[in-house]
């Protein structure tokens, strides 16, 4: 049969009778080709699985046959997977269910057989004979015995549940009493009244094994009660009555003597106290050393980024609560011990009174708390079905635990009690002292320490402790507070010393760098410019009497008047702020209202003084070291050297540092003496350098040649070199600005300048030199008689020049020098004394300028002579209307 051509024949190479034939794909689009190659399902007849293979191969192409084969294979795989799921889940469940059903059927069959055997055994037994009652009285006795037995059994049955309730309610004394009563009831059942039960035909152990098993359950509560009572002793907030009940529980159940119960009580309270200390240490975030101060890079000491006020209050509150918890544990332990064991005014202690009450038959004493007045009848009345226990024998209803009052185990000697309690108090104080010292480390200021100390002292005063115990506890807190205050102060002093050293080194280095780079920090280091620099006006933000902005403005004006520049104040502030803080702390300490504040203040001062003196020594060493580092008097280091001298002068004079630091008088005196000596050394070096520099610059500078003044018609004026040198010297002294003793320093500088100026290397034309000497002689005449040697030196130099040049000194020259000085007295004011002795007699003059011009008023009509001669005037210069004035 021939084959029909079909599009499916292009999809895959199909085997033919002659072998495989590879069909070449057409160049159509791949997607279209794939769509054309897919066999059509419509060509396959329905029910392909039921087709005859011969018919399938006859009607379909090879591709369609393969497609039918693939579909049939997929259907077969799906059915196999469904069978696997059914066999793996449903069939397995069916098998397990069938197995269970078979097992249940077998068990049911066995049960039915057993019941049948029991029924047959019962039916095979003979009927028991009827009981023969002797009489009505005998029947009542037997019934009473059974009721009595039921009461005993009821007590044993109810005891476990009620014991649990008592333990949960911490009624350990009642639980111990009930346990002892249950033990007596059990003995009555199995031992003591055994013959009585047997007389009534009752064998308790044989007929009622429940009694023994129930007692075994009750007997396990003994260890529970004693353990819980022992642990309960750790609760320091418990009342003395509850603690006494717990101790009686140990005494009755464990047969512990009363002295041993005292040891147990104190040992448990020791565990509680140590737990309170450790728990408080975990709650409070305490560091080994919490430094409240840090250093900035510029050397200032400032407090750490201030924590929020609520955070600091919370921290202080945690420390206070920890201290109060520890003290509460100690105080309540001592008070509870005395309430229980101490005999006051020949009266028995509480625990002794309870033991006597247990053994006595009298009415309950009025002094005994109601919870300790326990009896068996009151205990049975609180139990469930209490009416059923009324038929118990009187010996059980009046049961009392046995206590031997004459034995030493029931007595605590008072001397022994006092010694044991004192030992425990001392041991606890040692632990408390260590803990308090650690807790106080979390307090960063003296105010916090002293406020907490005062609060704790008041809290101790209101306690029930004895006077000597109060004194011991106060001493512990006073020592801890004192040590913490000393620690805060020592840390502040150490930080202040480090900050001072760093700030001084930074300032000196900045001055050296400014000198090298020819920079002048006018506002920071120049006292003159700082004096006339306008301070910012205060901004009033409130109506209060004291405004912070006004106080800052006032402090700025005060610093300007004292000549304390920003750079100088920055160095001194590191020490003065520390001292100011210490003074505030001392005022807080002195403000204490307690009677021991004076003694504590004296001890604080005594222990603090070495640290303060060490700071003074450290400051001196820092200044001396800084001075030695500036070993050469070069132009780059002289400014930093002068700055060190200014710091030393401020510390020795106006700064409150050394007077308020709290050192001994001899230390303060020695500090001022050494700083003054250091300042004098610095000023001597500055004076020598300044005079040498000024004289050297003026003598080496270019000067125009002038006509010799051997017979000048007009008196010559001082040379420009001398005036420039004097003006430079005046400016240098002004920049030094040592307000305290400025006149003496200016006098010494002027003395050295005059001595060096007229030295052997002075080269000056004779007449001009004589005029210069005359001006210098005028400056010297205003001084005291101590300048006599300088006057003689100038006079001898003048005579020498006059003899060498043959110059006759005229009086009008001296008048010209005096008038020249009167004209320049404002410029040379630094080198002149405050009051001219020559003008003192003229104080009553009517001249209005006398108060302002102390060294005379210059002549008005006199022609002005230039102080600096730049060049020789030309011949036609005189024809001009303008004088030969140097511009």
Image (cartoon, rainbow, N blue to C red):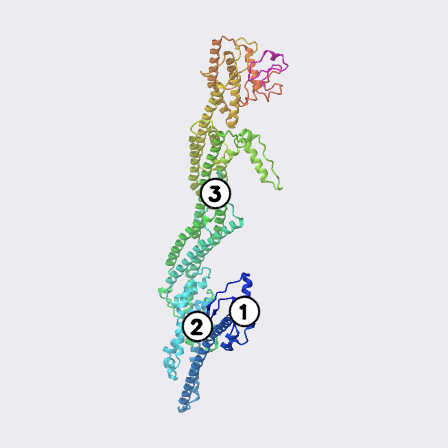
Where is 564 relative to 884, above or below? below
Residue 836: x %, y % from top left: 55, 20
Residue 230: x %, y % from top left: 41, 63
- Asked if disc 2 and disc 3 are in contact, CB closer than 8 Å, the reply is no
Identify the residue at image location x=37%, y=58%: 416
Between residues 293 and 334, which one lies in front from this camera angle? 293
Note whether residue 328 is visible. yes
Q: Which mark is residue 351?
A: none
Where is 441 relative to 69, above or below? above
Q: CA distance from mark 2 to mark 1?
A: 98 Å
Note whether residue 352 is visible. no
Residue 869 lies in quadrant: top right
In this rendering, the label closer to the viewer, 3 or 1: 1
Dot 1, crowdedness within 10 Å: few (<14), some or many (≥20)? few
SS at circle 1: loop
Q: Which mark is residue 294?
A: 3
- Asked if disc 2 and disc 1 are in contact, CB closer than 8 Å, the reply is no
Residue furthest to the right in view is: 881
Marked residue nearer the N-terminal end (3 or 1)? 1
- The stretch drawn in magenta includes residue 878: yes
Residue at image mark 2: 160
Which segment did they paint magenta? 861-887
């Amino acid at each position: 049969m021939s084959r029909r051509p079909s599009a499916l024949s292009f999809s895959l190479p199909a085997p033919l009778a002659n072998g495989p034939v590879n069909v070449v794909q057409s160049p159509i689009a791949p997607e279209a080709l794939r769509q054309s190659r897919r066999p059509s399902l419509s060509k396959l007849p329905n029910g392909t699985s039921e087709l005859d293979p011969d018919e399938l191969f006859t009607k379909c192409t090879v591709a369609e046959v393969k497609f039918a084969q693939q579909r049939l294979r997929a259907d077969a795989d799906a059915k196999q997977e469904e069978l696997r799921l059914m066999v793996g889940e449903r069939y397995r469940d069916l098998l397990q269910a069938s197995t269970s059903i078979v097992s249940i059927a077998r068990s049911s069959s066995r049960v039915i057989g057993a019941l049948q055997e029991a029924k047959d055994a019962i039916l095979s037994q003979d009927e028991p004979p009827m009981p023969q009652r002797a009489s009505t009285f005998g029947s009542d006795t037997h019934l009473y015995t059974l009721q009595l037995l039921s009461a005993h059994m009821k007590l044993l049955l109810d005891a476990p549940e009620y014991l649990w309730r008592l333990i949960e309610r911490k009624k350990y004394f009642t639980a111990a009493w009930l346990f002892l009563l249950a033990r007596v009831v059990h003995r009555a059942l199995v031992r003591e009244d055994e013959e009585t039960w047997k007389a009534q035909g009752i064998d308790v152990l044989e007929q009622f094994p429940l009694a023994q098993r129930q007692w075994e359950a009750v007997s396990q509560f003994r260890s529970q009660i004693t353990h819980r009572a022992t642990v309960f002793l750790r609760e320091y907030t418990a009342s003395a009555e509850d603690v006494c009940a717990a101790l009686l529980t140990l005494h009755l159940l464990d047969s512990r003597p009363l002295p041993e119960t005292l040891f147990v009580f104190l040992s448990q309270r020791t565990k509680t106290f140590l737990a309170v200390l450790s728990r408080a240490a975990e709650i409070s975030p305490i560091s080994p050393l919490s430094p409240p101060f840090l250093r900035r890079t510029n050397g200032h000491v400032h407090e750490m980024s201030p924590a929020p006020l609520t955070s600091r209050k919370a921290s202080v509150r945690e420390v206070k609560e920890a201290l109060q918890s520890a003290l509460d544990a100690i105080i309540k332990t001592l008070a509870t011990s005395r309430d229980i064991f101490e005999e006051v005014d020949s009266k028995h202690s509480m625990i002794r009174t309870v033991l006597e009450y247990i053994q006595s038959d009298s009415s309950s004493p009025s002094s005994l708390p109601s919870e300790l007045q326990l009896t068996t009848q009151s205990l049975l009345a609180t139990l469930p079905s209490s009416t059923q226990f009324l038929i118990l024998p009187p010996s059980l209803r009046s049961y009392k635990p046995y206590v031997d009052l004459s034995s030493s185990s029931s007595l605590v000697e008072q001397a022994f009690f006092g010694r044991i309690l004192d030992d425990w108090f001392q041991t606890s104080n040692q632990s408390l002292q260590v803990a308090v010292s650690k807790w106080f480390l979390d307090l960063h200021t003296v105010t916090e320490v002293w406020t907490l100390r005062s609060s704790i002292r008041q809290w101790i005063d209101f306690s029930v402790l004895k006077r000597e115990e109060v004194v011991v506890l106060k001493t512990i807190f006073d020592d801890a507070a004192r040590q913490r205050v000393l620690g805060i102060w020592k840390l502040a002093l150490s930080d202040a010393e480090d900050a001072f050293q760093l700030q001084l080194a930074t300032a000196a280095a900045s001055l050296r760098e400014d000198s090298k780079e020819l920079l002048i920090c006018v506002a920071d280091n120049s006292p003159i410019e700082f004096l006339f620099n306008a301070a910012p006006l205060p901004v009033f933000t409130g109506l209060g009497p004291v405004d912070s902005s006004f106080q800052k403005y006032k402090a700025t004006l005060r610093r300007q008047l004292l000549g304390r520049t920003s750079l100088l104040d920055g160095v001194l502030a590191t020490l003065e702020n520390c001292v100011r803080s210490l003074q505030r702390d001392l005022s807080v300490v002195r403000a204490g209202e307690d009677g021991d504040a004076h003694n504590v203040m004296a001890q604080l001062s005594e222990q603090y003084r070495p640290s303060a003196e060490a700071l003074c020594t450290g400051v001196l060493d820092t200044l001396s070291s800084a001075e030695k580092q500036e070993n050469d008097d070069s132009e780059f280091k002289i400014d930093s050297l002068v700055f060190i001298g200014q710091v030393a002068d401020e510390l020795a004079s106006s700064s409150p540092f050394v007077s308020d630091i709290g050192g001994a008088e001899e230390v303060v005196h020695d500090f001022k003496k050494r700083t003054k000596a250091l300042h004098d050394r610095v000023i001597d070096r500055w004076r020598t350098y300044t005079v040498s520099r000024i004289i050297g610059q003026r003598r080496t500078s270019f000067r125009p040649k002038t006509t010799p003044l051997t017979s000048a018609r007009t008196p010559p004026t001082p040379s420009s070199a001398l005036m420039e040198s004097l003006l430079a010297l005046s400016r240098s002294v002004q920049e030094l600005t040592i307000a305290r003793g400025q006149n003496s320093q200016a006098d010494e500088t002027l003395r050295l300048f005059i001595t060096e100026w007229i030295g052997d290397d002075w080269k000056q034309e004779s007449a001009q030199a004589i005029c210069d000497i005359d001006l210098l002689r005028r400056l010297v005449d205003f001084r005291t008689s101590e300048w006599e040697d300088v006057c003689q030196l100038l006079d001898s130099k003048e005579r020498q020049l006059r003899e060498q040049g043959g110059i006759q000194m005229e009086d009008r020259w001296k008048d010209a020098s005096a008038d020249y000085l009167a004209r320049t007295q404002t410029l040379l004011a630094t080198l002149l004394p405050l009051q001219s002795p020559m003008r003192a007699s003229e104080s009553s003059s009517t001249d209005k300028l006398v108060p302002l011009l102390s060294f005379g008023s210059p002549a008005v009509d006199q022609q002005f002579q230039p102080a600096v001669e730049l060049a020789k005037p030309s011949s036609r210069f005189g024809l001009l209307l303008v004088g030969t004035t140097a511009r």
